[in-house]
Amino acid sequence: MSNDPFALFADWLAAAWESEPNDANAMALATVSPAGQPSVRVVLLKAWDEAGFVFYTNLDSHKGNDIAANPLVGLDFHWKSRGRQVRIEGRAEPVSAAEADAYFATRPRDSQLGAWASDQSRPMAARATFDDRFAAASARFDGGDVPRPPRWSGFRVVPSAIEFWEARDFRHHDRTRYMRSDGGWAASLLFP
């Protein structure tokens, strides 16, 4: 059994890109509100390395507010076509402004403009409200680059535990859990 969960994650993610019909980088993100209410939604993994797993959002969104109050989060990749799942527990830490700027610059222009137009997760009276705000952002940045909005950035989930789950017949699944230990990783098998 390897003590490198990142090498195994790289292999599993590469296999998922070959077989998943859409968004092999989709992961469920679990947060907890200040009142203790758990919330789960799907976000897209945009970068990863041994420092952690990165996603982007509006910092004033539901998830952004939850993370500001409690940075301990969970991630889950479920690749149904492969019969595999990766669960990650860790701490969400803000990415640097330079990292957020660099990623934002790679987004399609309409996605950039949408970040300016949206008060993500807040109530909206009518769809026309967003459409009007999108049109205003389009006019504002007409012909020029679209800068990253001040309240739009990313988080890096620094893992403390990573579990790899693989389906087997009769629910005799393979489970390997990696726990951060003294700067390295310790692996152990779990009962199905």
Image (cartoon, rainbow, N blue to C red):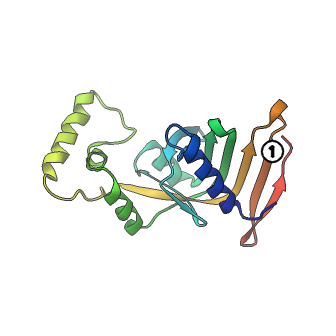
Left or right side of 152 for 128: left
Q: Is there any visible trace of residue 133 in the rendered image? A: yes
Residue reaching furthest front? 18
Left or right side of 85 for 58: left
Residue drawn where x is 61% and y is 48% of the image: 15
Q: Which residue is mark 1?
A: 174
Q: Is residue 56 above or below residue 123?
A: below
Q: Is there any visible trace of residue 30 in the rendered image? A: no
Q: Position of residue 163 (x, y in %)?
A: 72, 51
- Mark 1 is surrounded, within 10 Å at the Cα level, by few (under 14), some (14 to 19) or many (20 or more) other residues, namely some
Towards the viewer: 94 or 48 = 48
Residue drawn where x is 41% and y is 66% of the image: 99
- In which quadrant is the C terminus drawn? top right
Q: Secondary structure at mark 1?
A: strand
Towards the viewer: 184 or 167 = 167
Q: Is residue 127 above or below residue 142?
A: above
The mark total stands at 1
Left or right side of 30 for 95: left
Q: Position of residue 164 (x, y in %)?
A: 72, 49
Q: Which kind of residue does numbered mark 1 sit on? A: Asp
Left or right side of 153 for 180: right
Residue reaching furthest bottom? 183
- In which quadrant is the N terminus drawn? bottom right
Towards the viewer: 125 or 94 = 94
Q: Position of residue 48 (x, y in %)?
A: 54, 60
Q: Position of residue 28 (x, y in %)?
A: 57, 42
Q: Is residue 9 above or below residue 113?
A: below
Residue drawn where x is 31% and y is 59% of the image: 105
Q: Quadrant of residue 191?
A: top right
